[in-house]
Image (cartoon, helix red, strand yellow):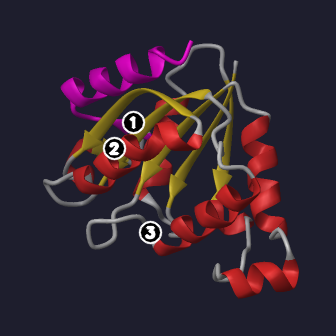
Amino acid sequence: MRIVAFGASTSSTSINKALATYAANQVEGAQVQVLDINDYSVPMFSEDTEKEIGQAEGARAFLADLAEADAIVISFAEHNGSYAAAYKNLFDWASRIDRSIFQNKPVVHLATSPGPGGAQTVLAAATGSAPYFGADVKASVSVPSFYDNFDFETGSISNEEIAQQVKEAVAQLA
């Protein structure tokens, strides 16, 4: 099984990328490709820009990488209760090329934040809209207080209950 994982964040020290990477690697025998959304450069979306340039190359490359996956793991950063602007912009460009961005693949949605809310607002929004964009969401898990529940030295979740939730979630991708 080939899993594409990414954090919907542009931070070079993204806790969401760390979480997505950890989660995807919990699937035994899976080949995991971790994407960095910084690699998919797109201009700010507008209809005027779309008329001028057509399809943004970064969005086409993003869709091509998703197409090679058997399953997808996404961990959403939450900025003021919503998607990170860079991810939303990439998503908007990609949806203009193919509304079924996730190509009816099995998906696990995750979200985390430094605080106790665990980015639950953006997780709910992403999970609620997922069927409209071709995502077969198998599970969603919010990880609160990331720095209290993740061990960077080992690259793993230190809270056994949360670790089990994540492992059960990604097991549904098989």
Nearest to the observer: residue 90 or residue 133:
133
Label 2 is placed on what type of residue? Asp
* Residue 119 found in image quarter: bottom left
Task: Provide the secondary structure element on which disc 1 rests.
Answer: strand
- Decide: few, some or many residues near mark 3? Use Cα within 10 Å; few <14, some 14-19, many ≥20: some
Task: Based on the picture, tell me whether residue 168 belongs to the magenta stretch.
Answer: yes
Q: Which stretch is magenta?
A: 155-174
Asked if one can make out residue 104 in the rendered structure from this viewpoint, the answer is yes
Q: Which residue was labeled with disc 2?
A: 151
- Decide: few, some or many residues near mark 1? Use Cα within 10 Å; few <14, some 14-19, many ≥20: some
Label 1 is placed on what type of residue? Ser
Task: Provide the secondary structure element on which disc 2 rests.
Answer: strand
Label 3 is placed on what type of residue? Ala
In this rendering, the answer to whether 2 lies above or below 95 is above
Q: Which residue was labeled with disc 3?
A: 84
**Place of residue 144 in the rendered image (x, y in percent of width and height, measured from the top left):** 20, 48
Q: Are marks 2 and 1 in contact (CB under 8 Å)?
A: yes
The answer for how far apart the CA atoms under marks 2 and 3 are is: 24 Å
Q: Which residue was labeled with disc 1?
A: 156
Q: Is residue 162 left or right of residue 13?
A: left
The answer for how far apart the CA atoms under marks 2 and 1 are is: 5 Å
Q: Nearer the viewer, mark 3 or mark 1?
A: 3
